[in-house]
Image (cartoon, rainbow, N blue to C red):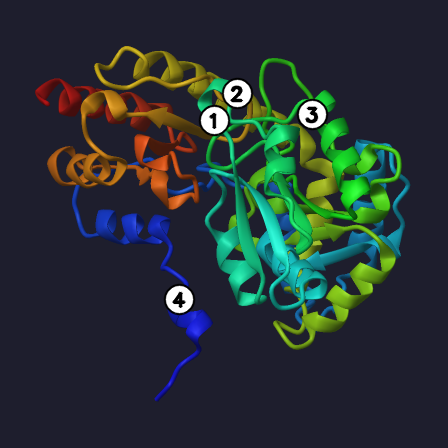
């Protein structure tokens, strides 16, 4: 049997691989998965229960429940300063579905998608599934892992069609500054690039900073899709509620394609999301403050370990640590760390960067108790080397 060459060529998720290996061991401290260790607020849980009790379990509209689209349109309009209405919003089965449907709606075979690297590995997977070509735009530690306009210009070709931005970034925690966004917006306008702005970590930002959306810049709303999700903002990963916000015609295409992918989102999850936007942002701020405490601790602690160094991430809940001083590659370091001291991290070369073998990704979306113990084990491992 000849199976799809595209499907055969896509590598398995390295994050899932590490999770599976760690699950087979006892007493593992896992820094591998990017999932909040918090639970949704009590109001969100009660809203989901109420929807189930009310037998609100039928198909939702393909673009999502209208009430949720209305609430989200108001929310994102206030957040960005761009006026969005219901036709500009689609509710999707998590942020991943929004990304996939948008790429499916935008790409023809061979179209190039520029992605800041290191990047969330699912981006390249989805581009391949949509018969596009991923073009990494390497960013570096010396630039705080932030995309530079010069790097974008270097990789542009006549086939360049889409630019994916992710700020705050998974896996680096980098945040794109307003000045850089303005320059990138100018490039997008001049070269007719469509921008997919993955803003799922927009509420997890530190040191009093604020996130800025490229969609808010003049002329960019009509060439930008904002991807968002309840997963990180409200700790609702299992509810699978995401959003796409952009030009009405793109939203209509995504809605049409939804029917052939998953038909509709989960109805009672959307009812819970409505409550999250009504009452959950205070809960979100409490989580953000805790993430900032964890970031400060793990940043200071890692920089005291021989062979490891890192810059302080400005958002999300990841730290991209440089382990080149240990003399090991990222994969060697990660494999030995798991086998010898039962700490799971993700090798940096799984995130599309040519420089990635010098780094590991650590998620601090886990308890402070786990972080203290995990860093202690990492220190013991590196000291023995």
The residue shown at (43%, 44%) is: 352
Tell me where residue 236 appears, x and y as whole percent. 56, 46
Identify the residue at image location x=26%, y=25%: 324
Q: Residue at x 18, y 37 (%)?
A: 342
Residues under labels 2 and 3: Cα distance?
12 Å
Q: Is residue 61 visible?
A: no
Residue corresponding to mark 2:
143
Mark 3 vs 4, N-terminal side = 4
What element does badge 1 sit on?
loop
**Which of the image's four quarters has the C terminus?**
top left
Residue 140 numbered tag = 1
Residue extending furthest bottom? 1
CA distance for labels 1 and 4: 27 Å
Look at mark 3 in the image and give the residue it sits on: 180
**First of labels 2, 3 by sequence position:** 2
Distance Cα–Cα, label 1 vs label 2: 5 Å
Q: Quadrant of the N terminus?
A: bottom left
Q: Are dots 4 and 2 in contact, CB under 8 Å?
A: no
- Lower sequence index among marks 3 and 1: 1
Which residue occupies the foreground of this view, 106 or 258?
Answer: 106
368 with respect to 126 (left or right): left
Q: Is residue 284 visible?
A: yes
Q: In what element is the residue under mark 4?
A: helix
Residue 149 screen position, x and y as percent: 66, 30
The residue wearing badge 4 is 9
């Amino acid at each position: 049997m000849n199976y799809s060459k595209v499907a055969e060529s896509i590598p398995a998720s390295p994050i899932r691989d590490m999770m599976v290996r760690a699950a087979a061991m006892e007493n593992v401290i896992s820094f591998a998965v990017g999932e909040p260790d918090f639970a949704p607020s009590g109001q969100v849980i009660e809203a989901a229960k109420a929807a189930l009790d009310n037998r609100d379990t039928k198909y939702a509209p393909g673009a999502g429940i209208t009430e949720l689209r209305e609430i989200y349109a108001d929310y994102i309009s206030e957040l960005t300063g761009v006026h969005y209405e219901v036709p500009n919003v689609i509710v999707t089965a998590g942020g991943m579905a929004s990304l996939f449907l948008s790429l499916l709606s935008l790409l023809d075979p061979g179209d190039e998608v520029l992605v800041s690297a290191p990047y969330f590995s699912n981006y390249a997977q989805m581009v391949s599934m949509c018969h596009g070509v991923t073009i990494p735009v390497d960013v570096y530690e010396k630039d705080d892992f932030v995309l530079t306009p010069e790097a974008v210009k270097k990789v542009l070709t006549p086939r360049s069609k889409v630019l994916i931005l992710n700020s705050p970034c998974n896996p680096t925690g980098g945040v794109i500054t307003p000045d850089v966004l303005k320059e990138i917006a100018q490039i997008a306008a001049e070269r007719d690039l469509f921008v997919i702005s993955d803003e799922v970590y927009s509420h997890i930002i530190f040191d009093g900073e604020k996130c800025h959306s490229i969609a808010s810049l003049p002329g960019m709303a009509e060439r930008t899709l904002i991807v968002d999700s309840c997963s990180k903002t409200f700790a609702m990963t299992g509810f699978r509620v995401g959003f796409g916000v952009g030009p009405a015609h793109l939203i209509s295409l995504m809605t049409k394609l939804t029917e052939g992918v998953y038909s509709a989102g989960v109805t009672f999850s959307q009812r819970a999301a409505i409550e999250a936007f009504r009452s959950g942002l205070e809960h979100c701020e409490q989580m953000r403050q805790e993430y900032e405490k964890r970031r400060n601790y793990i940043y200071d602690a890692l920089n005291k370990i021989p062979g490891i160094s890192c810059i302080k991430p400005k958002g999300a809940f990841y730290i991209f640590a440089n382990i080149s001083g240990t003399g090991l590659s990222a994969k060697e370091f990660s494999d030995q760390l798991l086998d010898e001291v039962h700490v799971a991290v993700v090798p940096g070369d799984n995130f599309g960067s040519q420089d990635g073998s010098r780094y590991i990704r650590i998620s601090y979306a886990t308890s402070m108790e786990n972080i203290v113990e995990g860093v202690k084990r990492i220190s013991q491992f590196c000291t023995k080397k």
